[in-house]
Image (cartoon, helix red, strand yellow):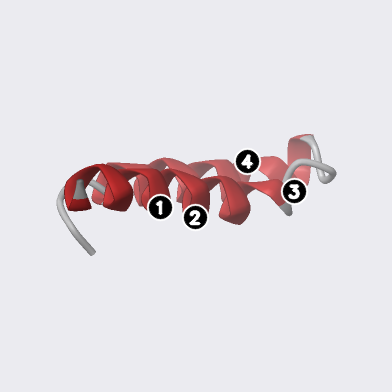
């Protein structure tokens, strides 16, 4: 895990905890969102 993705993972973990209670429909989208953000960061670093 790179320093750039650490805050994203932390936020995602918070959302993961909050989502099942508040909005169960949102929970499956969170890991996908994290993956997309990490991919974008990786692409930017590679460029």
The residue where tag 1 is placed is 39
Q: Check contact, mark 3 vs mark 1: CB within 8 A.
A: no
* SS class, disc 4: helix
Q: For the residues marked 2 and 1, what is the alpha-carbon distance in whole angstroms?
A: 6 Å
* SS class, disc 2: helix
Q: Residue furthest bottom?
A: 1
Q: For the residues marked 4 and 3, what is the alpha-carbon distance in whole angstroms?
A: 6 Å
How packed mark 2 is, by other alpha carbons closer than 10 Å (few <14, some 14-19, many 20 or more), is few
Q: Check contact, mark 2 vs mark 4: CB within 8 A.
A: no
Give coordinates of residue 41: x percent, y percent: 30, 45
Left or right: 4, with 23 as reference point: left
The residue where tag 2 is placed is 35
Is the residue 22 above or below the residue 16 in the image? above
Left or right: 32, with 38 as reference point: right
Give coordinates of residue 19: x percent, y percent: 69, 42
Which of label 2 and label 1 is nearer to you? 1
The residue where tag 3 is placed is 20
The residue where tag 4 is placed is 18
Q: From the viewer's side, name the closer residue of 24 and 45.
A: 45
* SS class, disc 3: helix
Which numbered disc flags the more N-terminal residue, 2 or 4?
Answer: 4
How packed mark 1 is, by other alpha carbons closer than 10 Å (few <14, some 14-19, many 20 or more), is few
Q: Check contact, mark 2 vs mark 1: CB within 8 A.
A: yes
Q: For the residues marked 2 and 4, what is the alpha-carbon distance in whole angstroms?
A: 19 Å
Q: From the viewer's side, name the closer residue of 46 and 16.
A: 46
Choose top left, top right, bottom left or bottom right for residue 23: top right
* SS class, disc 1: helix
């Amino acid at each position: 895990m790179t320093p750039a993705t650490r805050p994203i993972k932390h936020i995602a973990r918070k959302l993961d905890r909050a989502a099942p209670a508040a909005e169960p429909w949102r929970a499956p989208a969170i890991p996908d969102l994290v993956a997309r953000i990490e991919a974008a960061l990786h692409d930017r670093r590679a460029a």
